[in-house]
């Protein structure tokens, strides 16, 4: 089974402060990890995926297979970063490990960036 | 806007009534997904289509729920004999391929009173 844990329901920081949104996962096979973001009154959208190894809106995330984590980081938070952030996992090759190509989501972390 | 569209956006219904939601995926997207989201939770998978074939269903999808994608284009999700526990946001998403990015609609809010 595949499982995603986001331990923080809420993260509150001031503008300019570093941000780290935690994501831990449980999956015995080779995972593919994602971060989705939902801004106020907008639809859920992909922020970044680990295989792309890119920085989007200043955010980065590194897959740490040893710690089974995929934390989202940004060195200097901006007010416009305030949103719900969801970590998601899907199997990259589900056959042997019993996982699924269907993404499994964490419960989300609400990020509030104060001015 | 050529994104995933859902209708209606909001639905209030009395317990015991049937409701139907429609989803129009992005053109040429073969995969279509239904998720449910309740307050304080992330999206939970319900079911998935590849073209018109329903390939996977979650245990969350009770017998009162049925989904169709008759011509491999739009999809409907019907809930029969609604219960208060069905109150949630029902999200539709689509992707070109099983390994491609999934794009979500804005969701359909259901309130059962």
Image: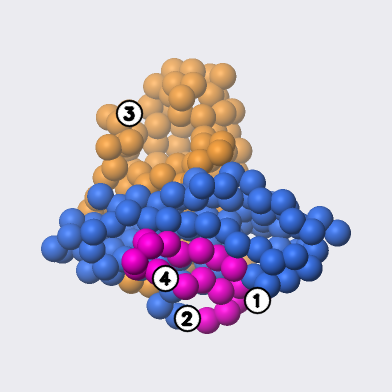
Chain colours: A blue, B orange
Residue for badge 3: B64
Q: Position of residue B49 (x, y in %)?
A: 30, 56
Start-end of magenta stretch: A54-73
Mark nearer the N terminus (4 vs 1): 1
Q: Nearer the viewer, mark 4 or mark 3?
A: 4
Residue for badge 1: A58
- 3D distance between C-alphas at marks 1 and 2: 12 Å
Circle 1: element type: loop
Residue for badge 2: A53
Q: Residue at x 56, y 38 (%)?
A: B40
- 3D distance between C-alphas at marks 4 and 1: 17 Å
Magenta stretch containing residue A52, yes or no? Answer: no
Read off the chain for label 2: A
Read off the chain for label 1: A
Mark nearer the N terminus (4 vs 2): 2
Which mark is drawn over residue B68? none
Circle 2: element type: loop
């Amino acid at each position: 089974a595949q499982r995603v844990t986001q331990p923080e329901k809420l993260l509150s920081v001031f503008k300019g402060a570093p941000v780290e949104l935690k994501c831990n996962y449980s999956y015995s096979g080779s995972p593919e990890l994602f971060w989705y973001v939902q801004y106020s009154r907008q639809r859920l959208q992909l922020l970044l995926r680990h295989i792309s190894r890119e920085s989007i809106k200043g955010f980065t995330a590194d897959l740490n297979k040893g710690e089974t984590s995929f934390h989202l980081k940004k060195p200097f938070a901006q007010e416009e970063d305030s949103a719900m952030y969801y970590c998601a996992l899907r199997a990259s090759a589900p056959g042997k490990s019993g996982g699924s190509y269907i993404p499994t989501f964490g419960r989300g972390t609400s990020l509030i960036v104060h001015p | 806007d050529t994104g995933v569209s859902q209708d209606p956006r909001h639905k209030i219904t009395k317990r015991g009534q049937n409701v139907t939601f429609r989803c129009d995926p992005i053109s040429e997207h073969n995969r279509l997904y239904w998720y449910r989201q309740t307050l304080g939770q992330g999206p939970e998978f319900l079911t998935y289509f590849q073209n018109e074939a329903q390939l996977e269903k979650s245990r969350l999808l009770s017998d009162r729920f049925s989904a169709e994608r008759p011509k491999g284009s739009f999809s409907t999700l019907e809930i029969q004999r609604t219960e208060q526990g069905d109150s949630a946001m029902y999200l539709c998403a689509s992707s070109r391929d099983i390994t491609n990015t999934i794009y979500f609609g804005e969701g359909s809010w259901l309130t059962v009173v």
